[in-house]
């Protein structure tokens, strides 16, 4: 079993920044793609960003140029640097990890991000 622990959410004013972290631990031989999703009240969960195990990232159009995803493979941790935050970025943010053997998807517990003045 793989456990994911998220941190870094909070309340920030429009235009501000936050950095989310998600650390994976448990029974896994290696980690593949790591990513972030978010779910706003009354809406479905949506993709935010992916970072692949070797090279490459992928972003939702709504966050391109403002958010940066990165990973530290030695720490089994994925980060999401969020800049120029907007009220519409308000949501619960979830990390998702593809872990081997399997592969299998694992989700974090979610961390609240609120952008408001």
Image: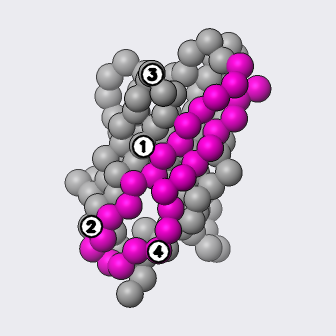
Relative image position of residue 58 (x, y in whole percent): 36, 39
Label 4 – label 3 distance at C-alpha: 30 Å
* Left or right for 24, reference 117: right
Q: Nearer the viewer, mark 2 or mark 1?
A: 1
Label 2 – label 3 distance at C-alpha: 29 Å
Q: Nearer the viewer, mark 2 or mark 3?
A: 3
Q: Give the magenta-colored segment's residue range.
A: 1-27
* Residue carrying label 1: 79
Label 4 – label 1 distance at C-alpha: 18 Å
* Left or right for 101, reference 68: right
The answer to whether any part of residue 105 appears in the image is no
* Residue carrying label 4: 11
Q: Which residue is rendered at x = 36% and y = 42% of the image?
A: 69
Specify the quadrant of the image occupied by residue 53: top left
Q: Badges 4 and 3: C-beta atoms under 8 Å apart?
A: no
Q: Which residue is rendered at x = 44% and y = 23% of the image?
A: 73
Q: Nearer the viewer, residue 51 or 46?
A: 51
Q: Which residue is rendered at x = 35% and y = 73% of the image?
A: 86
Q: Quadrant of the N terminus?
A: top right
């Amino acid at each position: 079993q793989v456990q994911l622990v998220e941190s870094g959410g909070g309340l920030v004013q429009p235009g501000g920044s936050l950095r989310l972290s998600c650390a994976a631990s448990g029974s896994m031989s290696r980690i593949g793609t790591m990513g972030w999703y978010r779910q706003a009240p009354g809406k479905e969960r949506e993709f935010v960003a992916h970072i692949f195990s070797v090279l490459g990232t992928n972003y939702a159009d709504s966050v391109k140029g403002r958010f940066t995803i990165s990973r530290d493979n030695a720490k089994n941790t994925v980060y999401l640097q969020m800049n120029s935050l907007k009220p519409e970025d308000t949501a619960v943010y979830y990390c998702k990890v593809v872990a081997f053997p399997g592969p299998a998807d694992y989700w974090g517990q979610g961390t609240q991000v609120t952008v408001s003045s």
